[in-house]
Image (cartoon, helix red, strand yellow):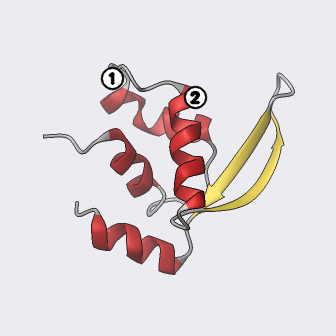
Amino acid sequence: MKQPLNYAILKYFTKVDEACADDVMNALRAEYGSYRPFKKAAVVEALMTAESNAVLHETRFDLDEKDDVRVFYGASEEERATINYYIKD
């Protein structure tokens, strides 16, 4: 059984230094692409919620090729430990 999408999003940050919503979607598309909530707005909301709960932190931002703002997030060692404590592989 697959993990819930929000869990998979958080676990992804235990394997990368930083990522934006597009990066997360690209990484999880093969497994979660058919899920109804697998939309950019939902992924952005999950990332913002994780940041507000101090599970992720904002690392930087830039503009994509369409001049839309991309916010990048990362997980410190302490944040990764928290994610791994609550979400098992």
Q: Nearer the viewer, residue 61 or 26?
A: 61
Is disc 1 placed on a helix, strand or loop? loop
- Indicate the amino acid at tag 2: Ala
* Residue drawn where x is 38% and y is 45% of the image: 6
* Residue drawn where x is 52% and y is 36% of the image: 43
- Look at the numbered discs 1 and 2 and tell me whether their residues touch, using CB distance below 8 Å: no
Is disc 2 placed on a helix, strand or loop? helix
Q: Nearer the viewer, residue 31 or 83?
A: 83
Mark 2 packing: few (<14 Cα in 10 Å), some, or many (20+)?
A: few
- Indicate the amino acid at tag 1: Tyr
Q: Position of residue 78 (x, y in %)?
A: 49, 80
Q: CA distance from mark 1 to mark 2?
A: 14 Å
The count of marks equals 2
Q: Position of residue 62 (x, y in %)?
A: 83, 44
Q: Position of residue 42 (x, y in %)?
A: 51, 32
Q: Mark 1 — residue?
A: 35
- Name above or below for residue 55 compared with residue 11: below
Tell me, for residue 41, which label it has, or none: 2
Q: Position of residue 10 (x, y in %)?
A: 43, 54
